Amino acid sequence: MSVYLHCLSHTPLIGHVDPAPAVLAEVDASIAAARERIARFDPELVILFSPDHYNGFFYDIMPSFCIGMAARAIGDFGSAAGELPVPRALAEDCARSVLAQGIDAAVSYRMQVDHGFAQPLEFLMGGIDRVPVIPVFINSVAVPLPGFQRARLLGEAIGRFARSLDKRVLLIGSGGLSHQPPVPELATANEHLADRLKGSGRDLPVEEREARTQRVIAAARAFVDDQHSLYPLNPDWDRQFMATLAEGRLAELDGLGNEELSALAGKSANEVKTWVAAFAALSAYGPYGADHGYYRAIPEWIAGFGSISAAPLR
Ligand SMILES: O=C(O)CCC(=O)/C=C/C=C(\O)C(=O)O
Ligand SMILES: [Fe+2]
């Protein structure tokens, strides 16, 4: 039984709108070092917490949490496409265990996932198909959202399940930190978009997919020129949040409401629930120490971009 954790921001803009070469080199070095540490750990199972951005989960039925029994990545923004190697029997055991522990996660036998799931697998593992992975969706975009406390309890339940396995488990949290890219919202959507958000967006026509991609790229370019064109990044909050997790003070976030978080750090900062769930899962193994923290605000990616590893204290 052993466990390792890595949490990493994601961005669909990598390769589309990039920061200066020196910044890119810094991020690349941090990710390469994390990949090496993970390779040394040699995980037998990945449990990956990620949000979705109206590519696999829609308002026809929007769960707060969903555990995948099988999953396929769509390859948006040039991210990897294809089946994820989900170990079905183990994923079923995980879902049974989580429900028995009082957390009502949904299950999907045909989960569709986007760059939120694919990117960390590509960056940290070298591909989406390298190691068996149980994908765990946390709704971080489509209001109403689950809060910090529920994300923590979900993570703890999954951690207790993981600890019961005789396996080297890698926990990954994908997303965050402060940011608010132009993700559509039902409250302000016109009829066509509302229909997409309610489920017809599951298989977008190619030209609509391309228009969506270009809209995000244009927003990033505008944000580089004028950092008030979108909700501002909040490096102070991001650093404070990373310290809270690193110091094992997860429950302190329970009292932070979703709208309060959005006001502090932008609506998509709610993606940090994936980090909380991953750290909570790690905490089920006992006290931990965090290391190799990296942070930089990167307007080109509309992201407070962070990366951190953690492992149990010996
Ligand atoms: O419908 C759209 O245009 C969705 C845009 C989108 O997918 C943006 C995603 C951004 C992130 O994943 C992020 O910055 O975390
Ligand atoms: Fe995201």
Image (tube, helix red, strand yellow):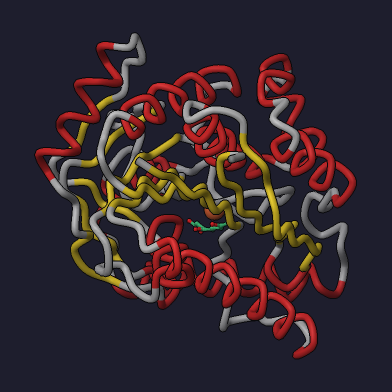
Q: Residue at x 22, y 46 (%)?
A: 111
**87 vs 220, nearest the viewer:** 87
Location of residue 277 in the rendering, given as x and y in whole percent from the top left corner:
51, 33
- Quarter holding residue 257: top right
Location of the N terminus (image quadrant): top left
- Would you place residue 306 above or below residue 208 in this image? above
* Quadrant in which residue 29 is drawn: bottom right
Q: Is residue 73 left or right of residue 291?
A: left
For the question of whether residue 144 can be seen, the reply is no
Picture coordinates of residue 220, whole percent (x, y): 69, 70
Going by the picture, which residue comes out furthest to the bottom?
21
Residue 269 in the image, given as x and y percentages of width and height: 67, 42
Which one is in front, 79 or 228?
79
- For the question of whether residue 139 can be seen, the reply is yes
Quadrant holding the C terminus: top right
Residue at horizontal 35 percent and vertical 53 percent from the top:
55
Residue name at image x 47 percent, y 50 percent: 172
Residue drawn at x 69%, y 75% is 27
List the single residue furthest toward the front: 314
- Where residue 186 appears, as percent x and y from the top left, is 49, 36
Of residues 80 and 88, which is closer to you in this image? 88
Check the image and report above or below for 75 versus 63: below
Above or below residue 100? Residue 120 is below
Between residues 107 and 125, which one lies in front from this camera angle?
125
